[in-house]
Amino acid sequence: MRGDDSPRGPSYRAYLALAAAGFQRYATYRQAMVAAVVTNSVFGFLRFAVMLAVIEAGTRTVAGYDESQLATFVWAGQGLIGVVLLWALPEFAERIRTGDVITDLLRPIDPVWQLLAADVGRAGYAVLTRFVVPVVVGALAFDLYAPRRPVTYALFACSMLLATIVCFSCRYLVHAAAYWWLDVRGPQTAWTLTSGIFGGLYFPVWFFPDAMAIGLIVATPLPSVIQIPLDILVERGSSTVQLGLLGVQAGWVVALLALCRWVQRRGERKLVIQGG
């Protein structure tokens, strides 16, 4: 196995090639894509029905969102699920369990950046398919909120990219637990539950008390995956607030990627080949 001091210096072209490969890989799964957008669209109707019941039970606005903003929150959120891909990367844990990860470690590229580049390519394909389709379905059925500030579209695009990297990092850490635990179903279940409840997937975190919502946004990476991009899109706050939210996401990107590299180095030292 290589040592920690082994040089790894692929050019940016290698990462572009990995991203392109990730795009092409998922572009071949057309039936899976169709099934995903249909499922997300159906659940979009169910989720928004619940949101409508909340609005009708209270005032015209709930937690700072009016009906059109909540509609956009739900339908853009259904599309965003496929972009950030909350529940995936199990093949990495399986490669660690079987010992096949040794092959990855012998390549002249860091496994963290290798998987990240491929995931960014996958997300690019998902934006064109799994994000666009649910939003179009929602726009045909309901009155969605259109951003009033043109800069919001650029900020949302940046936020989606940062959200993808944050989500990748969290999934990587969950499945890198296989270096120590052969069965990562426990950490994976914990991630699935917490990311949905406290990340804004099932309902906006602003449905919690303000102090709790702010604490979740600042002190945990979970809202950076779903909640923050959607808040930016529906313009919940001024442009300054939007930039502040992007700053929170950027901070989590730096911290989580550094943690991924640290865990990877520790995992390589701990690695025990299983079953081969």
Image: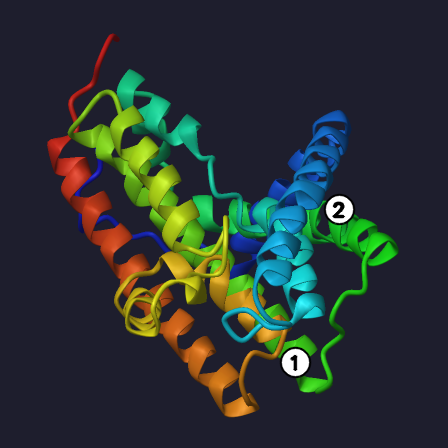
| 243 versus 275 height, above or below | below
Q: Residue 13: x, y in percent?
A: 57, 57
Q: Residue 14: x, y in percent?
A: 53, 52
Label 1, on which residue? Answer: 152
| 87 versus 110 height, above or below | above
Label 2, on which residue? Answer: 129
Going by the numbered disc 2, the residue's amino acid type is: Thr
Q: Are marks 2 and 1 in contact (CB under 8 Å)?
A: no
Please give the name of the residue rendered at 68% of the width and 45% of the height, measured from the top-left corner. Answer: 44
Going by the numbered disc 1, the residue's amino acid type is: Thr
| Colouring convention used in this rendered image of the protein | rainbow
Q: Taking 82 as reference, is 206 left or right?
A: left
Please give the name of the residue rendered at 33% of the width and 73% of the height, measured from the top-left corner. Answer: 214
**Mark 2 vs mark 1, CA separation in Å:** 21 Å
Q: Residue 179: x, y in percent?
A: 20, 30
Element at label 1: helix
Q: Residue 16: x, y in percent?
A: 59, 55
Camera-nearest residue between 31 and 223: 223
Q: Taking 203 as reference, is 182 left or right?
A: left
Task: Determine which quarter of the picture holds residue 99.
Answer: top left
**Lower sequence index among marks 2 and 1:** 2
Q: Taking 155 as reference, is 213 left or right?
A: left
Please give the name of the residue rendered at 75% of the width and 46% of the height, measured from the top-left corner. Answer: 129
Element at label 2: helix
Residue 213 appearing in the image: yes
Mark 2 is surrounded, within 10 Å at the Cα level, by few (under 14), some (14 to 19) or many (20 or more) other residues, namely many
Camera-nearest residue between 167 and 124: 167
Outermost residue on the right side: it is: 140
| 157 versus 88 height, above or below | below
Residue 111 appearing in the image: no
Of badges 2 and 1, the one in the foreground is 1
